[in-house]
Image (cartoon, rainbow, N blue to C red):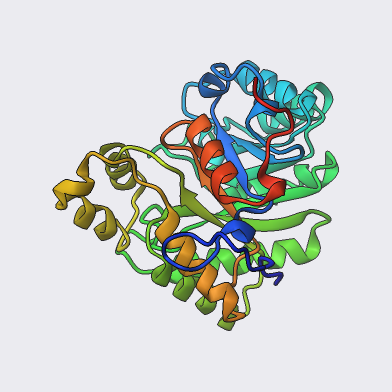
Amino acid sequence: MSLIPFRRKSSAPAAGRPIDALLSGYSIEVMPRTAAKIADFRSLLPGGTRVYIAHIDGTPIDDMVATAARLASEGFEVMPHLPARLVPDAATLALWLDRYRTEAGVTGALLLGGGIDSPRGTFDSSLQLMETGLFDRMGFDRLHVAGHPEGNRDIDPDGGDHAVMQALRWKQDFAARSDARMAMVTQFAFEAAPVLAWARRLRDEGIDLPIHLGIAAPAKLQTLIRYAVTCGVGPSLKVLQKRALDVTKLMLPYEPTEILSDLAGAAEAGDLPFAQLHLFPLGGIPAAADYAIRHGGADTQPLRARG
């Protein structure tokens, strides 16, 4: 597994460990409705940034494809979400893949179970999407899957991780027999120790899919707590709860500098089991991009200067 490159920089953050190298090559995600509010992504993001497009229940496929085409035309690598429980059947999946490829030039996707309780059709999991064989046949050469460092109650309702580990082993086996390059994109967390322990456990178990660690970008504390509860973030939620009790920090926007500094420490020690970072722009895309620009190196600067 490749590690995030690490280099020293004279202007280290207050915590004492530089984080600029961690932000190099970060990815980010948007929704069609949030993307529509951005006049030009080239004024916010580095050229070639991987941009995931979240497919939320109720979003028309036309909006998804149009957003993908727009982002691709602006010079970004586009990976739409494909939530299994929102796909009615294999014929619809084939149609969507064909549209993404022919109308937007997309050849990659993030495969998810989907954020709804009841499937809309025949698919219930990302494994079932992969079993169709459509991705290889239609030339999708990059497939990412979801990772849950703090558990996934959709798969293991009792809070364990036996089924989750089985699913990850299946996906690793699939990667070995597929033409697609695969990686795992995780849910966001707020504390380094739990996600480091989880990633090291996967490595010890022989699961070596590259891990793209989810990080919550700057946002209001109340916003983050709401998202964290909705998305099932586990033990690291206590970091936000502790912050909420500190009246001096309650009204200040959260920034992920502390967790990034701790991760930089792991990189400095030569044991950072993540390939790159993925930013969740819960406080808005401009805020996430601004944070990367302020704390990252030269390669986090936007493709176009903002005027």
Q: Position of residue 290 (x, y in %)?
A: 54, 37
Q: Is 7 in front, or is 158? A: 7
Q: Position of residue 161 (x, y in %)?
A: 41, 69
Instruction: Count the marks.
Output: 0
Residue extending furthest toward the front: 10
* Residue depicted at x 40% and y 70%: 194
* Residue depicted at x 76% and y 28%: 72
Q: Is residue 116 above or below residue 165?
A: above
* Residue depicted at x 76% and y 24%: 99
Q: Is 296 in front, or is 93? A: 296
Q: Quadrant of the C terminus?
A: top right
Please say whether residue 155 is visible from this viewpoint.
Answer: no
Q: Position of residue 236 (x, y in %)?
A: 32, 61
Q: Is residue 144 above or below residue 91?
A: below
Q: Is residue 205 above or below residue 239?
A: below
Please say whether residue 24 is visible from this viewpoint.
Answer: yes
* Residue depicted at x 14% and y 52%: 245
Q: Position of residue 97 (x, y in %)?
A: 74, 32
**In the figure, residue 156 lies in which quadrant?**
bottom left
Q: Quadrant of the N terminus?
A: bottom right
**In the figure, residue 76 lies in which quadrant?**
top right
